[in-house]
Amino acid sequence: MRKWASTLLLCLPLAAHAAVLPDIGRGVQALEAGRLDQAEKNLLPLAQRGFVDAQQYLARLYKQVGTEATRDEAIRWYEQSVSKYPLDADPLGRLRFEATRDPQHLLGVEQMLLQQREFGNPDALKRLVRLYRDFPGLADDDKIGDVLGAALATDDPDNIAAVIDWYRKNDGVRENFVQLIQLCARHYRRVDDCLPDLALNARMGRNPERVTELVDQALARYPSERVDAGLLYDMASRLLTNNVPQPPMQADAIELLEAASSRHLPALARLGEILTDRPDLIEDANPIEMLEQAHAAGSADAALTLGRAYMNGTLVEIDPSRAEQYLSEASETLPAGKFSLARFYMRGFAGDDEYVRAAPLLLEAARAGYQRADLDLARFYAENRVVQANPAYAFAFARIAQRNEVSGVAEFLNQLQPRLTDDMVAKGNSVAEKEFEARRYRNEPMLGLALNQESGATASESTLKDGETQ
């Protein structure tokens, strides 16, 4: 993905674009199609001139890019648009929380939405449901139940979709998953977002005929206001995910991705990723060209796949320089990018001097939820290669990987065990527990707020100093 922080049009003279006058309609269309460069060129000049609609769409664009620099720009433009669009306080508060980790920003969003609901704003209720979906610690079960019930009682498709999405996010509890499927089976003709859930349920039930029927329904309704390229992409993702024991259904997923790829950047990047491993799925496919196209349009996922391809020699010659370039770009926003860049350094492509760069990358990836990174961290600390081995830390991260059921950790622990003393095991257990608690505070910010209010203490932010590698 391009380096937005250094190439924002804020740094360019407007005269450079005088040949084509900016147009908000063209900017919005480019934004929806994922052509972020074109969207920025049209929206930024208008936002700078004070057009509030352009400011709002520009904030959405920078929020979508997702880097720290563009997050700050998104906050800046939402601060401008919120006077006309009060509900912009929702993404604004979320971004401020992301920047500061201060839960008070989320409480401010909640109070604003409750107030807007009292004022009769029709969009406030579904946004409140989404807030509780993303930050369940904001409300207890009774409060959430009341809000979900109120949303269903409106019989409004958007509110029903928000409730269904709450159950989707919380489907790890069996009762919630059953409720999700029941609601989707009842409402899928009005709530097209249910099609991916029903497709996953059919896949889990080993019912390929039902999957094909649902895919056909989605393609028949595409493109439309309710069935867009994003929905096709989501549906394909459910058919490909490795989070269920049933095998992926690549043929159906490819059909969906191919239909969506001309309008949806992530679909194009995912299509290129699949075809990199299985170019035979589409005759005369050129997955590297697809990925280059997606990368040129700003896709971090495409940069990740290209980086891995040039690192491993998949469909291209091994090229360490290009691999590092692509993986570095991907690492700016993707935990998987940090993980793959760390592996690049651990495999010695950049020389021994760069080997130590792997540890902080793996730690960041693990703390961002990329669970495989913990096992690679354990391996990093177990090796006595460029840095001195630290068996206690190796054991600590292996313990975390074991808790998360990462594949291969049992074999690693068996190999590490003969090198461990009782003191190393005790230290490793202590480090693992503290690191695990630190991650809980990151993932459940309201838990930290509640404990701080009770004790006046500040939750531990990390177990290791981020630069600690030995």
Image (cartoon, grey):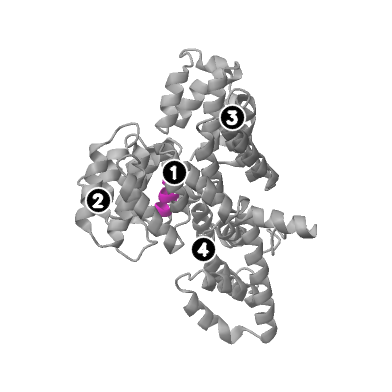
Q: Secondary structure at mark 3?
A: loop
Under tag 2, what secondary structure? helix
CA distance for labels 3 and 4: 44 Å
Mark carried by residue 252: 2
Splitting the image into 4 quarters, where does residue 55 fall?
Answer: top right
Determine which residue is flagged by label 3: 119
Q: Position of residue 260 (x, y in %)?
A: 31, 39
Q: Which residue occupies 67% across, 71% down?
A: 431
Residue annotated with mark 4: 371
Instruction: Identify the element where label 1 is drawn.
Output: helix
Label 4: element kind: loop
- Label 1 belongs to which residue? 152
Find the distance from the CA under tag 3 to the CA under tag 2.
45 Å
Give neighbour class at mark 3: few <14, some 14-19, many 20+ (Cα, 10 Å). Answer: few
The mark nearer the N terminus, 1 or 2, is 1
Alpha carbon separation for disc pair 4 and 2? 28 Å
* Disc 4: CA contacts within 10 A as few (<14), some (14-19) or many (>=20): many
Instruction: Report x, y in % for residue 370.
Output: 51, 59
| Amino acid carrying mark 2 in the image | Asp
Q: Earlier in the sequence, mark 3 or mark 2?
A: 3
Q: Which is nearer the N-term, disc 4 or disc 2?
A: 2
Dominant SS of magenta comes to helix
Mark nearer the N terminus (3 vs 4): 3
* Amino acid type, label 3: Phe
Going by the picture, which residue comes out furthest to the right? Answer: 456
